[in-house]
Image: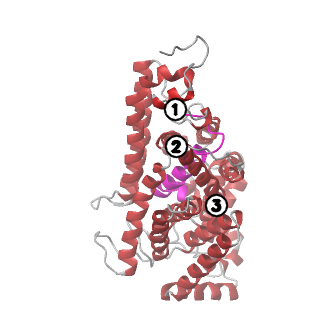
Amino acid sequence: MTRRKRGGKRSAAPADRHSAGEDTRPDALRRDQPGGDDQTAAAPRFGFTETLHRTIVVLFLVATPIVFWIPAKDPFGLPKEILSRLEGLLILALVGTAWILRGKLPPVGSRDPRILLPIAAVTWTAVAALFSDQPRASVSSVVTVSLAAVIFLATLHAARAIGSRFVHLAFIPAVINALLAWSQGGFGWNPIPMEGSARPGAPALLGNPNVAGAFLAVPALAAVAAVVAARPGRRLFPLLIAVVLFAGLLFTLTLTAIIAYLAGLLLLFLVRARGRALGIGIAILFVAVGLLALEPRMQKRFQKMQQAIETRSFDALVTFRLTAFVSAARMFADHPITGVGPGRFSWNYFHYKSVVESDYPRLFPHGPRPMAIFGDAHNDHLQVLAETGAPGYAILLIALAVVARETFRRRLPGLSTDDDRESIDSRKLARVLALPLAGCFAVLAMGQFPLQLAAPRLMILTFAAICLAWSEDAPPE
């Protein structure tokens, strides 16, 4: 019988430890023990809490992007936003209950140094709300950012605990939406009753083709990264997912999302440039551009863009969103430190709209457009600047840099056991995906507002958490 020496490690031989089922991996590769050997006895205290926490994360990850309620005023957006907030509140309630009953917080990523970025985002959003022109009106946005931070930290912990299977769970709602986009865009059959959209493209279960494109771009890119990172013999499944998601993205006909996907894909294959891989990446780029060029509705879009360039009608070139872009820039110029306040872009838009149309008539050759109503800037870079000022945008850029740097982590040496092999595969996926994910979001946010929408925001937070959870220096769980 082996005994534990006080202050020391077990004295059992390696063979005895393997036969007893003990985890003999290095400390850096243990994900299921909160504090390593010294805290093994305390781990069971949170067994039920951690299981419930992972269940909440997985259930809402799958359910939020596909939920809808036809009788609602916004049948696709509102239910998703409600579920997003409910997830954050449930996780907070779970953590609070564990703290009250146990006297100790469960390890929901609490020791990860990258917790500072979510805290900084929430803190500065609250500060910006205090200096808002209507602080009470900014409370809702502060709640949204706070709960998004909670979801990110919970997803970070769940991804570490569940391991490589977690990325497959993240693909489930994306595949469902992609298949429905196939049905809507490819076959003209929509099993979900919804009002016809004035914009061409398949809306899937997101209610709008733009939102569907913003939602599918990130998991479609992650699926390609999974193919590249997978071992030979295990690439067929992620390849099928990548094809399904890529086709679904094309059926949305959302140009910004497709360009963001292709930009991320280009970064992926440039980083992994190894002859055949680079050739495959370039071939995919040409195929995507060719399919878009052959689509009749996209041909009309390209013709309008060409006419806008020839006539120097920049507003038409960006589908008449220039008013929103310039208005957001003016808001930032007038309030460079704290912005106009979280969630206050829409309330200040009409005032700035009249100002920019009067000050810059050459940018708007079609004249003022009284009916051009924008609740969001359609550019998350400018909206973050407008609503939270330079510090808020700096936090966003730092977050992108933190994710992107995972691509440049050094590799771990190969280990012999299957568990170690799985861990190395997870870390390889994190390295392959990190920089392309940051690049994809940066491009997507230039013409979309994914941070303001529950389903696209959830996909971005989920895959960012996967990259950070499986990084080389992530603390063991």
Residue 175 locus on image (x, y percent): 41, 64
In the picture, the quarter occupied by the C terminus is: top right
Which sits earlier in the primary sequence, circle 2 or circle 3?
2
Is 282 placed left or right of 181 in the picture? right
Report which residue position mark 3 lands on.
436
Against 175, residue 301 (above or below) is below
Q: How packed is label 3: few (under 14 Cα within 10 Å), some, or many (20 or more)?
A: many
Which residue occupies 48% across, 71% down?
243
Q: Earlier in the sequence, mark 1 or mark 2?
A: 1
Disc marking residue 23: 1
Query: How far across and how far down the image is residue 340, in percent?
Result: 62, 50
Q: Residue at x 59, y 85 (%)?
A: 302
Whole-angstrom CA distance, mark 3 to mark 1, is: 34 Å
Q: Amino acid at mark 3?
A: Pro
Asked if the residue under mark 2 is in contact with the one under mark 1, i.e. CB atoms within 8 Å, the reply is yes
In this rendered view, identify the residue nearer to me: 261 or 70. 261
Which residues are the magenta region? 449-477
- Circle nearer the viewer, 3 or 1: 1
**Dominant secondary-structure state across the stretch colored magenta:** helix
- Residue at figure coordinates x 41%, y 70% from the top left: 203
